[in-house]
Amino acid sequence: QIDKNPGSKQVVVADAEHRGFPDIPGVRMVSPRDFGDIDFPYAALKYSATDLCCALKPLAVRWLLATSGVRSVVYLDSDICVYGPLDLLLEAAARHRAVVVPHVREPLPNPERFWERPSLGDLAYAGVLNAGVFALSADEEAMGFLETWSRLVTGPGAFLNTLGGQWEQNSFNWITAFLDGMHVLRDPAYNVAYWNLHDR
């Protein structure tokens, strides 16, 4: 949530019936059932734990934008390590409807060594953009994209190779086609990972 006020709201997503979390000052526990548009007991049976977390991501972001009153949200996956201020991301988020970060900034080296993984094809299949680092505004167009993204990851065929995949990560790629006012943050300090060390 973009807010420089240290007393701003924080949100933790958990299953309210089985959360097991202690009360934490400034933290609000939210059940996935509050997000709407998902049959949570059925989804909990259908998806693996990882896929369920991924499927809930766009619903959680949409719920937060709709209920918190903030103008925009910065989302970071739980496996993202942050070692410094996110100033460039926050500044871009203040100027654009959406801010996205590509998985790589340059082609992989040694393309003739086709046996090395990941290849560009592997990355494209997973997602050209990192759905674990982005910012979205709370306007109607951005909310419309979140609605589409939510449908892709919860509808028939989601997370199933034989029915088209529709992974949370590669479904996020549609933001480039469905949303105007998007900014691609190519700063090499963001989204550093083993597959893009060649362009850092």
Image (cartoon, helix red, strand yellow):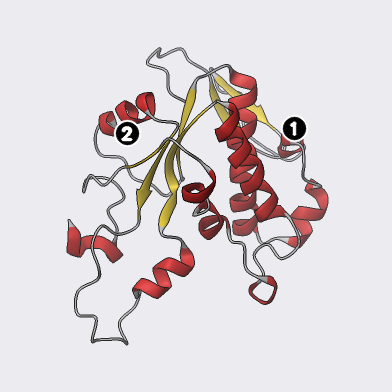
Position of 142 compared to 118: left or right? right
Q: Which amino acid lies under the numbered mark 1 shown in the image of this protein?
A: Asp
Marks 2 & 1, CB-CB < 8 Å contact: no
Position of 199 compared to 157: left or right? left
Q: Position of residue 39 (x, y in %)?
A: 81, 47
Q: Is residue 13 visible?
A: no
Q: Position of residue 188 (x, y in %)?
A: 21, 48
- Ranked by sequence position, the earlier of labels 2 and 1 is 1
Q: Position of residue 197 (x, y in %)?
A: 21, 62
Figure check: 130 above or below 28: below
> Where does label 1 land, which residue?
34
Disc 2 from disc 1: Cα separation: 29 Å
- Give the residue at x 37% y 16%: 4
The answer to which of 131 and 46 lies nearer the viewer is 131
Within 10 Å of the Cα at label 2, are there few (<14), some (14-19), or many (20+) other Cα atoms? Answer: some
Image quadrant holding the C terminus, namely: bottom left
Q: SS for tag 1?
A: helix
Residue 14 falls in image quadrant: top right
Figure check: 134 above or below 195: above
Residue 192 - label: none
> Where does label 2 land, which residue?
89
- Give the residue at x 54% y 46%: 178
Tag in front: 2 or 1:
2
- Give the residue at x 49% y 54%: 173
Q: Which amino acid lies under the numbered mark 2 shown in the image of this protein?
A: Leu
